[in-house]
Image (spheres, rainbow, N blue to C red):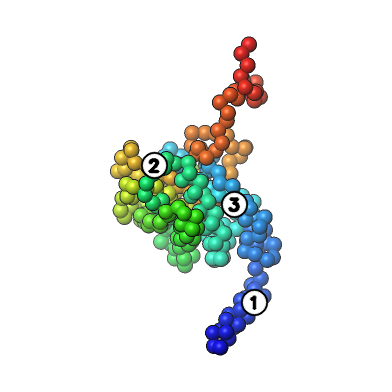
């Protein structure tokens, strides 16, 4: 009887909360859901994240979507405006990106370790929460439900002072971040190590974090990989480069690109 009353009160409280703070899509503002089906669909096609100038040492990285259009406000609402309910759809997107980058890597025994990129102490204080940790936990749950032996591994912490990177060039961002990550323990030699973060823009943060995780690893050890919810898209339309993952479909060996720039079909000997 009491349980029924409690449930009824909780239901009324939920309905009232929706009236006080109407639920709208964090991407496009459409009323109804935290992320409408149209905006959520933008997070279902994992792609290789390739910053405009790929920093040396940038880890192979998969992104669930492009950090542009409605996904920009959606990620920012989660990160900066306290819309924690977005951890569900964004964490699921992160799981998809992890699965994509793991599928491109050599098969290894052992777990898939998700290493969250730590926020600075100042950012944690001002946000009052660890938003990458929230995404990581959700992604681990999704991956495990899908049968992948995923685990969260907090191997990195932030040290030193970092200026706000907004407005800095890629090189300046890298210099700003140099030496800011500290590894508490070396990653286990078994299994895959996947750095996880919300977005990748210049690639400086992931490069720096990967360097710290990789130091001391043997060449035969699996490389450090990375996965993010969204990546800044490259413009003009991206071309395949060495920084890409093998998840990108390969051009058929029979197709040659002639000097005129037009694609031809299978090579014809003349
Ligand atoms: Zn929407």
Q: Quadrant of the C terminus?
A: top right
For this orientation, the residue located farthest to the bottom is 1
User: How far apart are labels 1 and 2 at the CA level?
Assistant: 48 Å
First in sequence, mark 2 or 3: give its number. 3
Residue tagged 2: 223
At x 53%, y 62%, the residue is 87
* Picture coordinates of residue 62, whole percent (x, y): 51, 45
Q: Nearer the viewer, residue 199 or 115?
A: 115
Describe the element under mark 2 as helix, strand or loop. loop
Task: Let me know if residue 53 appears in the view.
Answer: no
Seen in the image, is 216 located left or right of residue 47?
left
Q: In which quadrant of the rendered view does residue 93 lie?
A: bottom right
User: How far apart are labels 3 and 1 at the CA level?
Assistant: 28 Å
Residue tagged 1: 15
Mark 2: few/some/many CA within 10 Å (<14, 14-19, 20+):
some
Q: In which quadrant of the rendered view does residue 23 lie?
A: bottom right
Residue tagged 3: 43
Q: Quadrant of the N terminus?
A: bottom right
First in sequence, mark 3 or 1: give its number. 1
At x 41%, y 51%, the residue is 112
At x 56%, y 46%, the residue is 46
Q: Nearer the viewer, residue 27 or 126?
A: 27
């Amino acid at each position: 009887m009491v349980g029924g009353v409690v449930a009824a009160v909780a239901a009324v409280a939920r309905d009232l909360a929706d009236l006080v703070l109407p639920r709208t899509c964090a991407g496009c503002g459409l009323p109804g859901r935290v992320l409408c089906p149209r905006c959520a669909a933008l997070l279902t096609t994992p792609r290789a994240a390739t910053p405009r100038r790929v920093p040396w040492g940038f880890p192979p990285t998969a992104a669930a979507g492009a950090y542009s259009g409605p996904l920009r406000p959606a990620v920012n609402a989660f990160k900066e405006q306290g819309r924690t309910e977005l951890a569900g759809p964004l964490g699921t997107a992160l799981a998809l990106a992890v699965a994509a980058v793991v599928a491109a890597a050599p098969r290894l025994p052992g777990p898939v370790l998700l290493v969250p990129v730590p926020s600075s102490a100042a950012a944690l204080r001002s946000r009052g929460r660890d938003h990458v940790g929230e995404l990581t936990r959700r992604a681990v749950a999704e991956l495990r439900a899908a049968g992948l032996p995923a685990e969260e591994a907090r191997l990195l912490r932030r040290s030193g002072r970092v200026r706000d990177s907004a407005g800095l060039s890629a090189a300046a961002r890298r210099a700003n971040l140099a030496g800011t990550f500290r590894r508490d323990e070396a990653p286990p030699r078994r299994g895959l190590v996947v750095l996880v973060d919300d977005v990748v823009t210049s690639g400086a943060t992931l490069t720096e974090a990967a360097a710290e995780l990789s130091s001391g690893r043997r060449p035969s050890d699996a490389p450090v990989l990375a996965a993010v919810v969204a990546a800044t898209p490259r413009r003009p339309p991206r071309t395949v480069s060495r920084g890409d993952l093998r998840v990108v479909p390969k051009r058929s060996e029979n197709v040659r690109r002639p000097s005129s720039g037009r694609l031809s079909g299978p090579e014809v000997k003349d």
